Image (cartoon, rainbow, N blue to C red):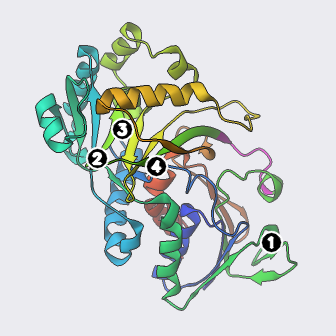
């Protein structure tokens, strides 16, 4: 079978990988020279800890195993099973974590509650105020800026993969697409993975798509002069991720509301050290379009202050700031929007903030649904 994948982000690339594993040939089109959307503007976190019990957690655990297996063949992914520590600084935050580790799925997530000394033994860089920390052994990380090129190099070695960057698809029909050079590409199957590019062709194919766009801000520091052995989160991540919902979280929100800047910008602190030793730090969440073309400084100041409190030291120089946009399905019963929009043409988008985490398993599920 000849398969056409449209979209060079991590979701499109994983669909190409799964097609090749099934013995198909793949032509992979991307409108930019390289993917430039949420697939590279993220933490590279494979995040299991806060996923909602049920299909969301099950998908994250499958994907986590897939990433580790894939890294054995593609070391350039930069995969490391570094786990994460969510730093807790108040009794109310600790109560949320206590309820979380008492859940039946705690062992699947690899979670346990550590005291401050145990947490610092895992991550000595955390010298700031800490009452306890929530450890999640299953959390991991890859390098988002290099993962897609590394995967494509791996796919190319099959001899059945063709990468065509700088090709924006303008038209699609049963068994073909036409790009902006006028070239028509034939295929037995077309899979559209447009990320947050939901206008243009996607808007024509599906004008009332129940997928929204979400904007976030992040930053990266210069090299930190010591290892940060785990990924790090603050307790605001427990307010964000649905796996923590419950009476103790309701009490935390009532008794210790977020600072105004954090609440207004839908903020949590996530931090991971890159292979070159710099720190990627974020993030914010903005849902109301049209999005601003510039970035707001107050959230960065909040993130910088919170990070320095956790590390107990000044941050290295900030060398990059950026905004990104991802697509998120509005149907709460669905992890991703997957739909046949024309005979032999499938649209897969809207995984939200789980795209980097879940893409290997999402692509597997697509191929299982297609039965191809």
Badge 1 density bin: few <14, some 14–19, many ≥20, Cα 10 Å: some
Q: Which quadrant does the N terminus fall into?
A: bottom right
First along the sequence among labels 2 and 1: 1
Q: Is residue 271 magenta?
A: no
Q: Which residues are magenta?
A: 205-213
Q: Which quadrant does the C terminus fall into?
A: bottom right
First along the sequence among labels 1 and 3: 3
Q: How far across and down, in percent of the image, does residue 49 sit?
A: 32, 41
Judging by the rendered image, the residue that carries numbered circle 1 is 173
Judging by the rendered image, the residue that carries numbered circle 4 is 43
First along the sequence among labels 2 and 4: 4
First along the sequence among labels 3 and 4: 4
Which mark is nearer the camera, 1 or 3?
3
Residues at badges 1 and 4 in contact (C-beta under 8 Å)?
no
In this rendering, would 248 be left or right of 197? left
Judging by the rendered image, the residue that carries numbered circle 2 is 228
Vertical placement of 237 versus 123: above or below?
Answer: above
Disc 3 from disc 2: Cα separation: 21 Å
Residue under the point 27% across and 52% down:
82
């Amino acid at each position: 079978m000849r398969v056409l994948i449209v979209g060079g982000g991590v979701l499109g690339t994983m669909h190409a990988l799964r097609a090749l594993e099934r013995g198909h040939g793949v032509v992979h089109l991307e409108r930019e020279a390289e993917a430039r959307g949420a697939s590279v503007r993220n933490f590279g976190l494979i995040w299991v800890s806060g996923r909602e019990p049920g299909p969301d957690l099950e998908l994250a655990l499958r994907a986590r195993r897939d990433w580790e297996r894939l890294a054995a063949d593609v070391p350039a992914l930069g995969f490391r099973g570094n786990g994460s520590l969510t730093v807790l600084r108040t009794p109310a935050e600790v109560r949320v974590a206590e309820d979380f580790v008492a859940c039946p799925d705690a062992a699947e997530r690899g979670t346990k509650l550590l005291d401050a000394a145990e947490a610092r033994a895992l991550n000595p860089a955390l010298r700031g105020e800490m009452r306890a920390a929530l450890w999640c052994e299953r959390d991991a990380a890859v390098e988002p800026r290099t993962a897609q090129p590394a995967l494509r190099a791996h796919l190319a070695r099959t001899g059945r993969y063709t990468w065509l960057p700088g090709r924006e698809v303008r038209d699609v029909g049963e068994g073909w697409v036409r790009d902006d050079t006028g070239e028509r590409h034939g295929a037995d199957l077309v899979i559209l993975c447009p990320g947050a590019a939901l206008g243009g062709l996607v808007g024509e194919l599906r004008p009332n798509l129940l997928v929204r766009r979400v904007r976030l801000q992040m930053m990266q520091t210069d090299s930190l002069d010591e290892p940060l052995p785990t990924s790090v989160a603050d307790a605001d991540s427990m307010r964000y991720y649905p796996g923590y919902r419950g009476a103790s979280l309701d009490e935390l929100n009532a008794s210790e509301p977020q600072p105004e800047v954090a609440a207004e910008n839908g903020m949590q602190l996530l931090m991971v050290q890159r292979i070159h030793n710099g720190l990627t730090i974020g993030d914010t969440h903005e849902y109301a379009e049209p999005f601003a073309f510039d970035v707001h400084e107050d959230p960065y100041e909040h993130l910088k202050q919170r990070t320095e409190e956790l590390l107990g030291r000044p941050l290295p120089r900030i060398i990059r700031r950026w905004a990104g946009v991802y697509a998120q399905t509005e149907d709460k019963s669905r992890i991703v929007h997957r739909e046949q929009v024309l005979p032999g043409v499938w649209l897969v988008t809207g995984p939200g903030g789980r795209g980097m985490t879940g893409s290997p398993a999402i692509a597997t599920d697509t191929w299982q649904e297609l039965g191809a």
